[in-house]
Image (tube, rainbow, N blue to C red):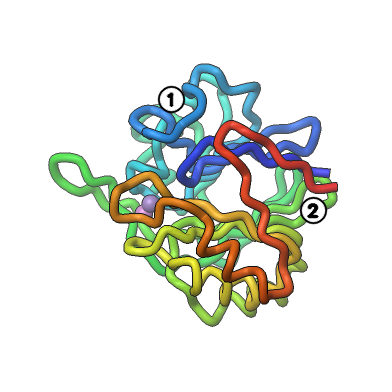
């Protein structure tokens, strides 16, 4: 059993009933965030897909507060370590074992830098395949559609795929539907929409897109949880 809680944009909490794994924890400045980072339950790991502020978010502060590692691409992990976070660096194709299960880092077609007044290089963007609570979850991060998603789905039997659908900066709804087919996932959870004016404002296009596909679309309302038995 796993339970997914959505905080808006690409921020999720994955619970296996015992441990809590946080994805792309953007709370401060996130217009959709349902809670503040200080209201989070006990966190056991933080996974960050790339260095853009809408994904790195409050990761460093949460790492310090909960004394847990940020699992991220090598250069981004070093960026976080320089700011006082605990880190566990990985790179594409690698798998690592943690108390809660395993994490494999996958590629993503996107960019990655911390853009402030200047831009600081934070390596390559990534996705994650997480095995925990008897389920296998693929978190795509920010990415375009790419054909190697088929290989990701062949190497790991994916139950739940979290895919960006907002278009402009990532896949849109139609490409996300193709992605879920390639991944051969059973359930598809949309993310990365409605946050910015240029993004799609609802998941409806994705829900329509999934109607003719094998996987079931599961739209999690912001602030709500969904349990996968
Ligand atoms: Ni991004
Ligand atoms: Mn983004």
Mark positioned earlier in the residue sequence (1 or 2): 1
Q: Is residue 35 above or below residue 126?
A: above
Q: Mark 1 points at which residue?
A: 61
Residue 144 sits in quarter: bottom left
Give x and y (percent) for residue 42.
65, 22
Q: Ligand 1 is located in which of the four quadrants?
A: bottom left
Residue visible at 37% across and 27% down in the picture: 28
Count of number-bearing discs: 2
Q: Position of residue 194 (x, y in %)?
A: 41, 47
Distance between the Cα atoms at labels 1 and 2? 29 Å
The local crowd at label 2, few if under 14, some if 14 to 19, many if 20 or more residues have their Cα within 10 Å, is some
Determine whether the residue tagged by mark 1 lies in a helix, strand or loop. helix
| Quarter placement of the N terminus | top right
Label 1: few (<14), some or many (≥20) within 10 Å? Answer: some
Q: Can residue 84 be seen in this view?
A: yes
Q: Which of 57 and 161 is in front in this view?
A: 161
In front of the other: 90 or 20: 20
Q: Does the closest atom of ligand 2 sit within 8 Å of the Cβ of label 2? A: no
Q: Is residue 179 above or below residue 161?
A: below
| Among the 4 quarters of the image, the one containing residue 195 | top left
Q: Toward the viewer: 24 or 68?
A: 24
Furthest residue in direction bottom, as rendered? 147
Identify the residue at image location x=38%, y=63%: 167
How far across and down, in percent of the image, does residue 20 sit?
68, 33
Residue picked out by circle 2: 135
x and y percent of residue 107 in the render?
Answer: 50, 67
User: Can see residue 75?
Assistant: no
Q: Residue at x 49, y 42 (%)?
A: 24
């Amino acid at each position: 059993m796993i339970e997914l809680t959505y905080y808006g944009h690409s921020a999720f909490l994955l619970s296996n009933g015992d441990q809590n794994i946080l994805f792309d924890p953007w709370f401060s400045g996130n217009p959709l965030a349902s809670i503040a980072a200080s209201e989070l339950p006990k966190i056991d790991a933080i996974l960050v897909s790339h260095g853009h502020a809408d994904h790195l978010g409050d990761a460093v502060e949460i790492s310090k507060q909960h004394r847990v590692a940020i699992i991220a691409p090598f250069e981004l992990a070093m960026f976080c370590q320089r700011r006082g976070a605990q880190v566990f660096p990985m790179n594409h194709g690698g798998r690592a074992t943690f108390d809660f299960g395993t994490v494999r880092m996958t590629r993503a077609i996107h960019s990655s830098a911390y853009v402030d007044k200047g831009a600081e290089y934070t390596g390559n963007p990534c996705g994650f395949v997480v095995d925990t609570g008897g389920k296998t979850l693929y978190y795509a991060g920010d990415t375009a559609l790419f054909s190697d998603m088929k290989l990701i789905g062949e190497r790991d039997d994916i139950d739940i795929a979290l895919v960006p659908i907002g278009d402009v900066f990532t896949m849109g709804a139609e490409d996300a539907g193709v992605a879920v087919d390639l991944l051969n996932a059973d359930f598809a959870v949309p993310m990365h929409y409605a946050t910015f004016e240029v993004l799609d404002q609802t998941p409806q296009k994705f829900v329509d897109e999934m109607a003719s596909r094998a996987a079931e679309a599961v739209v999690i309302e912001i602030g709500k949880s969904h349990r996968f038995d």
